[in-house]
Image: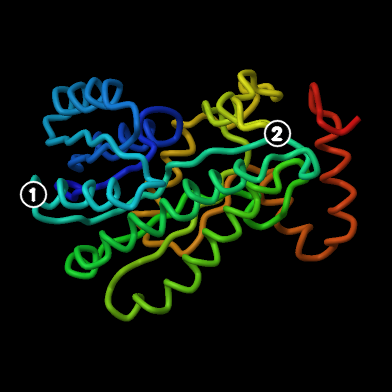
Amino acid sequence: MKDKVIIITGASSGIGEALAQVFAAQGSHIVLAARSIDKLKGTAAALASRYNIKTLAVAADVSKQEDCKNLVAQTIVTFNRIDVLINNAGITMRALFEDLELEVIERLMSVNFMGAVYCTRFALPHLLHSQGSIVGISSIAGYRGLPARTGYSASKFALQGFLEALRPEVMDRGVNVLTICPGYTASNIRKAALVSDGSFQGETPRKEENMMSSEECATHIYRAVTKRKRTLILTPIGKITVFLNKLFPSIMDRMTLNFLKKEPDSPFK
């Protein structure tokens, strides 16, 4: 990955920020994208100084097509190439569907799904030229729908369907498509989860200290990118969930419900 140009969306915290650190340590040039430009600029400057690489910070709301187009355009102006696009930006939610404002699902789809579609579409000509990689950070919820996460699960199923359909279109032209499905990983995503009215949850219902760290997750993702793998499923519980869901989907309906009922302040009464 030395001297490769890597675009990472959602790079201001969590897995995105950890990915920037991991790729920078290997000599990659990093393009960081997120809505919070001040945080990005600080991270970009620190990476450039520490690893003697080039960085670029771009303010981008991936739910906006023009922001994604601008992200790619600025990358090409600065580096004249793109080698890896990591579609990491994402949000989640936690509420029963019957209580949910429909705008919450629209927001999840616009960020988690359409954001990846926009960025991939604008970056694709350059990735075809470099025979690079498209990476989608999905979720175990893209394999197994989770109760009280209907909007989140739907957006991740959509993302995985998009990437699965795109893969055969570009594989004979040298572009690799990699779908990453982390299990529970310590990050800010649950603190910023949307509840039924679209406001932020504020506190995570899970013990973050017991989860895989963002740094460990990023290291696994880096290795999968370098090996040009097709899929990567992380954490033991994530792997077990995907495996059991293939064999016993009806049983998994009950198991996932019971599991999520035990969360603190669960929406299931």
Who's the residue at 35% across and 66% down the image?
176
Mark 1–mark 2 contact, CB under 8 Å?
no
Residue at label 2?
196
Who's the residue at 61% across and 26% down the image?
199
* The quarter of the displayed image where residue 60 is located: top left
**Badge 1 or badge 2: first in the primary sequence:** 1
Q: Is residue 220 left or right of residue 205?
A: left
At label 1, which amino acid type do we have? Val
At label 2, which amino acid type do we have? Ser
Image position of 26 with respect to 128: above or below: above
Q: Nearer the viewer, residue 110 or 148?
A: 110
Q: Is residue 106 left or right of residue 132?
A: right
Q: Is residue 98 left or right of residue 25?
A: right
**Horizontal and vertical percent position of residue 97:** 76, 44
For the residue carrying disc 1, how many other residues have a C-alpha within 10 Å: few (<14), some (14-19), or many (20+)? few
- Find residue 200 and name its label: none
Residue at label 1?
77
**Horizontal and vertical percent position of residue 197:** 67, 31
Q: CA–CA distance between discs 1 and 2?
A: 41 Å
Colour scheme employed for the rendering of this structure: rainbow
Who's the residue at 40% across and 55% down the image?
135
For the residue carrying disc 2, how many other residues have a C-alpha within 10 Å: few (<14), some (14-19), or many (20+)? many
SS at circle 2: loop
SS at circle 1: helix
Image position of 107 with respect to 51: above or below: below
**Horizontal and vertical percent position of residue 222:** 37, 46
Q: Tell me the quarter of the image containing the C terminus.
A: top right
* The quarter of the displayed image where residue 220 is located: top left
Who's the residue at 48% across and 58% down the image?
179
**Horizontal and vertical percent position of residue 223:** 39, 49
Q: Nearer the viewer, residue 97 or 2?
A: 97
> Which is more foreground, mark 1 or mark 2?
2
